[in-house]
Amino acid sequence: MLYREAGDFKTSYVDDSQTFPIAFDRRGYYGLIAVIFLVLPFLVTDYTVNAILLPFLIFSIAALGLNILTGYCGQVSLGTGGFMAVGAYSTYKLMTAFPDFNIFFIVIISGLITAVVGLLFGLPSLRIKGFYLAVATLAAQFFLVWMFNKVSWFYNYSASGQITAPERTIFGQPITGPQTEPWVAYLFCLVFVFALAWLTRNLTRGRIGRSWMAIRDMDIAAEIIGVNPLRTKLSAFAISSFFIGISGSLFFAVYLGAAEVGEAFGIQKSFLVLFMIIIGGLGSVFGSFAGAAFMVLLPVFLKLFFVDTLGWPTDIAAHINFIVAGGLIVLFLIVEPHGLAALWRTVKEKLRLWPFPH
Amino acid sequence: MKLKTLTLAASTTAILAGPAAAELVFPSLDYRTGPYAAGGIPFADGYADYFTLLNERDGGIGGVPARVLACETGYNTERGVECYESTKGEGALVYQPLSTGITYQLIPKATADDIPIHSMGYGRTSAANGEVFSHVFNYPANYWQAASGIVNHMLEENGGDMSGKRIALVYHNSAFGKEPIRTLNELGALHGFELLELAVDHPGQEQRSQWLEIRRQRPDYVIMWGWGVMNQVAIQEAANIRFPMNNFYGVWWSGSENDVLPAGAGADGYRSVTFHGVGDDYPVFDDIQQYVVDAGLAAGAGDQVGTVLYNRGLYAAMLAAEAARTAQEIHGTAEITPAMMRDGMEALEITEERMAELGLPGFGPEFAVSCADHGGPGNSAIAEWDADTETWSLISDFTAPDNDVIEPLIMEDSLAYAAENNLPETRCE
């Protein structure tokens, strides 16, 4: 009925291997892109951008990055927070050292710097796997946070160790700093999210992505059929860190405006992003978005519901929030261990046949 | 049924449409959950109770009722942003972030939105320079003045000579904890004492190695810059190594009942610097008992009245209410806007006479805020804990810190901020 495939014939390989082979999906996707780029910027307010959309977009980038490494390449990492900090501090140093340099390129360069750092910390992955690698990346997390806390050069010797993003503009519109219009900040992050999601999708269905998945599924076999583990693992680390660096950079410069490494990029960030991809779905672009939405938006909506609508005391609401969010995580993982993306796939399978039973 | 739904819908829209009657909105970015809740709860209670008292006893401020808008941050900066964005549209007059990290974030945002921030005894110390920070106030005292106040008390005990003494600083490894380091180094150069820096990572439950170091190094004094669970652990550790408690000083965020009670008798004689009075021996507490507690309107569990942090919340609310009153007088209207509130804060004058009228005689220093000076005099006293009676008592008078040392540091840091953000270095006439 809704989800028709009848008459949707493919006459070329290109058509057949596209991301959205079903016309209904494809139109929905184009419609969504049109809405988020052309309609939403006119509707957003301070609150929707700063409390809902920005964290969602920025964490989507981080989740995409970690999904490349963990979901597609099978290398567990607990260093996400530390790599986000690298992105944030690179941005801060570049912004204050080169005031006239365009913020757009600063964000990208911060991503590249993080990619190099990620590459370095990815080296142990050539010798160790799984749980041991997780511990090695955990060391990266603690080392990076310690370093940004210890070396005063990173925060320009300020008395407190806080970094604050100065105002920078693109086409005369402030992107960072307090004068930023909400729609500008939203569009700026959206451009990155769109470009990086598109990049992820096309990387993962090409040669590079296939070699990542081969390493993930059985590294010995992959090596025998000619996949170079060194290049594959390190490329996954570098590209993943590039994404995470960009997300850290935006997190500091556009969303928070000021940050302190221990509080903003601590171990809890690493876990948060890891939960996002586990709940969203490992090895799926949609899953990264779904997981980010679940982990970022659920607490906000619960707060709005309990406190602003029902008028409950704030502490009770905060505790209920933990219970509900935790309960939902457990429930989702019981119902669908492969995450929200797999749940979505199942729904689509059902819709293809609906209203017939099978 | 249908009628019921209709009335429900109507009442909901009425609630959502906002208050019809005028009110003064005071957001309280508090935290009653998380690792710092022990400090967040009493402060939030005191803040809310004072406004409840004003509403019940005087019908608000200048005849307009006050409304405290609570929002739970959990001491987390992202929640803090969410709280700020969700409350600023309600006519929020002044923000008390109660977290140095959140304060740093809100400084540019609130300045752009023309809403004042009052970070009382925390936040960015150099915001005391009103020439650069137009919307941020940290009167009556800041961290650097606290550090100086502690050192002054040590000087007094040592007959003015600290040369050759060694002081260990046990600090929370965050923006807040690092604040006093530069000041203490300057003061060390001036008075000839040596500073050992020992960082404690969030949340601060693990301090064995730091105290082992203290045991090895045997410093003459320990100063603590902690918050939340870190304080209790440090005091317990100090008691374990039998460090003389009279030589152990905490900042004002490390000097509440929560911090010393767990260590029992071992905490006897522990000291902390403070910028306001302790205990509930002030006339205002009778009114609070009568109008708030007995009326069943107390915030939280109502069991915090008179504790150190409750008093601090009360003091913050009192200063906010006085600033609002000042703003009403300046602008000749009872329904003030955040911009008017800022003017009121900048013209705030607290005299001993006024504090006595409010039922808080001698509770804090006399001070007057001006356009250039948002920091106040920074007078502080030292309080000491008596484990037998479980009370804090002041062991010194409120004395002025060494502002000659602090002033240049404030100028340096605030001008660096102005340069980074292309702000004018002077805005006052």
Image (tube, coloured by chain):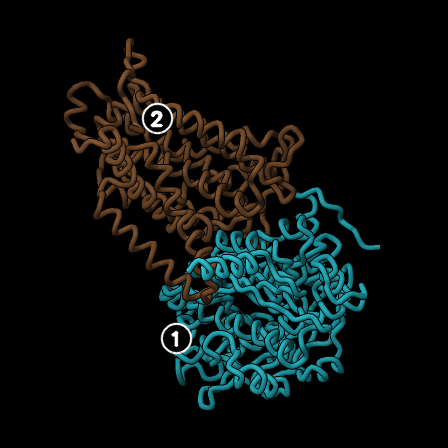
* Residue A135 located left or right of residue B377: left
Residue nearest the viewer, comparing B214 with B309: B309
* Residue B425 located left or right of residue B47: right
* Residue A312 located left or right of residue A232: right
| Chain holding disc 1 | B
* Residue B344 located left or right of residue B363: right
The number of discs equals 2
A358 to B279, vertically: above or below: above
Structural crowding at the residue carrying mark 2, measured as other residues with C-alpha within 10 Å and reported as few (<14), some (14–19) or many (≥20): some
Pointer 2 with pointer 1, Cβ within 8 A: no
Q: Position of residue A69 (x, y in %)?
A: 31, 34
Mark 2: which secondary structure?
Answer: helix
Q: Are marks 2 and 1 on the same chain?
A: no
Residue nearest the viewer, comparing B398 with A358: A358
Q: How far is mark 2 from mark 1, CA to CA?
A: 62 Å
Q: Amino acid at mark 2?
A: Asp
Q: Which residue is mark 1?
A: B236
B291 to B128, vertically: above or below: below
Q: Position of residue B406 (x, y in %)?
A: 68, 62
Residue drawn at the location 34% of the way across and 33% of the way down? A286
The letter of the brown chain is A
Quadrant of image for the N terminus of chain B: bottom left
Q: Is residue A280 visible?
A: yes
Task: Give the color of chain B as drawn.
Answer: cyan
Q: Position of residue A85 (x, y in %)?
A: 45, 43
Furthest residue in direction front, as rendered: B2
Residue drawn at the location 28% of the way across and 13% of the way down? A9
Tell me which corner region of the image, top left, top right, bottom left or bottom right, holds residue B228: bottom left
Q: Which residue is mark 2?
A: A25
Q: Amino acid at mark 1?
A: Gln
Q: Is residue B161 visible?
A: no
